[in-house]
Amino acid sequence: MLNVFLTVDTEIWPYAEGWPVHALSPDKTTFDAEIAACLYGRTLDGDFGLPYQIEQLNQHGLKATYFLEPLFADRAGSHHLAALVQLIQENGQEVQLHLHTEWLSEIQDPSIPAHFRQYMHQFTLDEQTALIAKGVRSLQTAGVAAVHAFRAGSYGANQATLRAAARNGLLFDTSCNPCYLGRDCQIDPGRPMLQPFKMEDVWEFPVSFFQDYPGHRRHAQLAACSFDEMKTALLDAWKAGWHAFVIVLHSFELVKNRTPAALCQPDKRNIDRFHKLCQFLAGHPDKFRTAQFSEMDPAAIPGVEPAQALRSRPHHTAWRYAEQALSRFV
């Protein structure tokens, strides 16, 4: 049985030119438009954000992990964070910690660095420890009983991030994205990163990927893969006896054209991919189970590494390029 982790990075991005290099204006007192777009996916055709995603997951009997970014709430209001935690948890899905350090210039908290840097790995171990501690406190205050897992914004972690997570009592991290290695992501265990591995006293669950053409990796993100590429990778991982397969999407991944001037539009391509993925996983309970980090027993994670990375089929990748070209005109 392959454990499939549907992980949803849940975050907002301010409508402000030059942010975060330039701090938000003190006159900005509401984030209603950003929250409507990034979190609730509001469009003229209905909402396609968290409530819609969760409804579809529950209809198919699937579980997901919402990696919720809490720093925004220090600027936008803690009631927004509490509402998100309630929405996710009351519907049987789980909340874990996500941090985008872009928000630091907007926060007045002496326990954490006062100015943003783009990536977690740009902070010292002690600073990262304080940042994760701040995030854990914020989620717990908003109603999360216990935090088990972490993902750095933009996958921008290093080994110190894992040590900081362990210092805060976290058991799991899923910041490692082999497709971003050496750039945003600085986690380098010196070994293939296909399956969970123990590092710095936490279990790292790397984002899954496949080779879509020679010498190139494609990570398993809803918006980045055709459904056939994703389906083939899942089936190949199951056939190879993998323990875990980590998929990424975002709270706003089913909408497009996020601007302050008008409501978003539904992203019909990504909505179709999401529906097909839910139907596929639900239709093969003999092969796949959607898992959550709060239910994982670290002692039960096998330390076996597959010998070969996954590969896409050329015609599936060709179809993705065709989909992307068509979406520019539809």
Image (cartoon, rainbow, N blue to C red):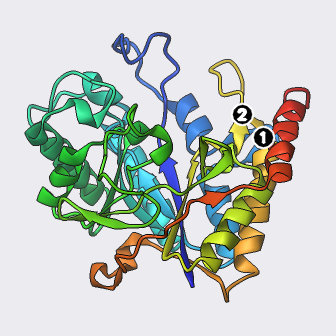
Query: Which corner quadrant holds the N terminus?
Result: bottom right
Q: Earlier in the sequence, mark 2 or mark 1?
A: 2
Residue positioned 65% across, 84% down in the render: 287
Mark 2 Cα-neighbour bin, 10 Å: few <14, some 14–19, many ≥20: some
Which numbered marker is on residue 306? none
Q: Amino acid at mark 1?
A: Pro
Residue placed under numbered mark 1 in the picture: 266
Residue positioned 49% across, 48% down in the render: 9
Q: Residue 241 placed where, x, y %? A: 55, 80
Query: Which corner quadrant holds the C terminus?
Result: top right
Under circle 2, the secondary element is strand
Residue placed under numbered mark 2 in the picture: 256
Under circle 1, the secondary element is strand
Residue positioned 24% across, 28% down in the render: 107
Q: Amino acid at mark 2?
A: Lys
Left or right relative to 206: residue 161: left
Tell me the quarter of the picture where residue 126 sits. Answer: top left
Marks 2/1 in contact by CB < 8 Å: the verdict is yes
> Distance of mark 2 from mark 1, alpha carbons?
6 Å
Q: Is residue 267 above or below residue 237?
A: above
Residue sitting nearer the eye, 157 or 178 = 178
Q: Is residue 95 visible?
A: yes
Q: Is residue 297 above or below residue 124?
A: below
Q: Residue 206 placed where, x, y %? A: 43, 57
Residue sitting nearer the eye, 217 or 327 = 217
Q: Is residue 83 visible?
A: no
Tell me the quarter of the picture where residue 41 sits. Answer: top right
Q: Residue 170 placed where, x, y %? A: 23, 63
Residue positioned 13% across, 43% down in the render: 130
Q: Is residue 245 above or below residue 37?
A: below
Left or right relative to 173: residue 214: right
